[in-house]
């Protein structure tokens, strides 16, 4: 039987604080004994992971479809094709992630925490599905879901941990 991970998206407009929030949450969740996997959507950019002149870059430039590198402490694999979010989540779970935090992929249907920086960003709440919480820089609200300050990482982490526990019961 394939492992299942609990999935939670963190969405918001550019520069809303998604990455900073996730970087503050990850250690708190890992300290609770939960293995966290992270998937980042690069909205339309063609990111570069390996560096020009390095062996992995040379192999990729030579046309390899897949390039992997491993050391005593880590492994990375780069594929020369986009993968759908469900497949990325499945791979994260197979690699041992218990909770997968997804930054971006606004159109996907997984449960979402929406990060709002400016008052005009509230429109995003009507454009996405599955909102389970709002993380705000100001006193924004959303009927029916908890609202947290972006600076209250402990309360946000407690929400994520509770969400994870409820999700494990639903998938177990």
Image: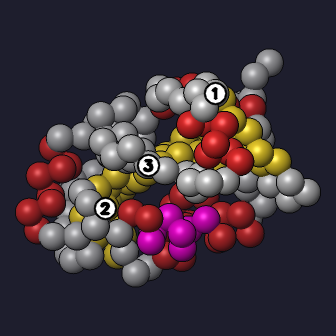
In this orientation, does residue 93 appear? Answer: no
Quarter holding the N terminus?
top right
Stretch in magenta: 20-26
Label 1 Cα crowd, 10 Å radius (few <14 / some 14-19 / many 20+): some
The furthest residue to the bottom: 151
* On screen, residue 119 above or below 98: below
Q: Nearer the viewer, residue 75 or 116?
A: 75
Residue 64: assigned label: 1
Looking at the image, is mark 1 or mark 2 earlier in the sequence?
1
Please state the horizontal and vertical placement of residue 130, each as a whole percent of the image. 34, 39
Label 3 Cα crowd, 10 Å radius (few <14 / some 14-19 / many 20+): few
Of badges 3 and 2, the one in the foreground is 3
**Disc 3 target residue:** 47
Quarter holding the C terminus?
top right
Q: Main secondary structure of the magenta part?
A: helix
Please state the horizontal and vertical placement of residue 132, each as a whole percent of the image. 38, 49
Residue 56: assigned label: none
What residue lies at 39% left-to-right and 63% top-to-bottom? 18
């Amino acid at each position: 039987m394939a492992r299942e991970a609990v999935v939670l998206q963190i969405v918001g407009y550019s520069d809303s604080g998604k990455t900073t929030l996730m970087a503050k949450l990850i250690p708190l969740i890992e300290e609770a004994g939960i293995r966290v996997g992270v998937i980042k959507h690069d909205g339309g950019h063609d990111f570069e992971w390996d560096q020009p002149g390095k062996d992995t870059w040379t192999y990729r430039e030579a046309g390899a479809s897949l390039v992997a590198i491993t050391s005593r402490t880590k492994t990375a694999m780069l594929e020369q094709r986009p993968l759908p979010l469900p497949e990325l989540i499945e791979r994260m779970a197979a690699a041992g992630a218990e909770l997968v935090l997804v930054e971006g992929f606004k159109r996907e249907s997984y449960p979402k925490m929406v990060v709002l920086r400016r008052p005009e960003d509230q429109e995003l709440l009507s454009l996405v599905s599955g909102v389970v919480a709002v993380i705000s820089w100001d006193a924004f609200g959303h009927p029916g879901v908890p609202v947290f300050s972006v600076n209250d990482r402990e309360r946000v982490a407690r929400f994520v941990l509770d969400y994870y526990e409820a999700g494990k019961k639903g998938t177990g």
